[in-house]
Amino acid sequence: MGPYNHIQFRTPQTVAYGLNDSPTALAAWILEKFRGWADCGGNLEKRFTWDELLANITLYWMTETIHSSCRLYFEMKTAPLHLALGERIEVPCGIAHLPKEAPFPPRTWIERGYNVQHWTEIASGGHFAAMEEPEALAADIRAFFRRFR
């Protein structure tokens, strides 16, 4: 993820304008991310249908939201979350960790800064949890929030 992060940390609009101008470039960019970040071993059809992939691309294309997607990285660099020594976010937090989601900090690091009340290791999946493991993710979200009824 180095070059991907680098360009979006520094000049996100540069890549965003090109992607927003060309549906072919947008499709290539998004499909490359799905191929590399999903738990599919490089075979998109192992995990997704073409209708799902094209719906995702079309959503970005029709709403022209690749800009905000790219800019998120710049904003995180500009105003990162920094917790002081011993400071924590005390709102109850739930984590669903998928094995191919990378980079992913160790649980001990996350627990230093967040009030982790629920942690689930989902058996498979990557960056696109809601598309890769929708049933497991939905069950996990329900399990986390059940205690707050």
Image (cartoon, rainbow, N blue to C red):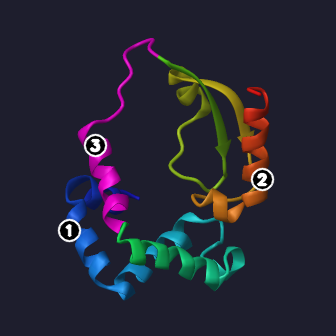
Question: Is there a contact, CB below 8 Å, between mark 2 and mark 3?
Answer: no
> Which residue is found at the position 21% from the left and 55% from the top?
10
Q: What segment carries the magenta color?
A: 66-87
In the rendered image, residue 137, in percent from the top left (x then y), is placed at 72, 51
Q: Quadrant of residue 92?
A: top right
Amino acid on which disc 3 is placed = Lys
Along the line of sight, the residue nearer the viewer: 130 or 7: 130
Residue 29 shows in this picture = no
Q: Quadrant of residue 26?
A: bottom left
In the displayed structure image, the side of residue 141 where residue 65 appears, left or right: left
> Which residue is found at the position 48% from the left and 79% from the top?
58
In the rendered image, residue 128, in percent from the top left (x then y), is placed at 59, 61
Q: Which residue is mark 2?
A: 136
Q: Which residue is mark 3?
A: 77
In the rendered image, residue 130, in percent from the top left (x then y), is placed at 65, 59
In the displayed structure image, the side of residue 1 where residue 123 appears, left or right: right
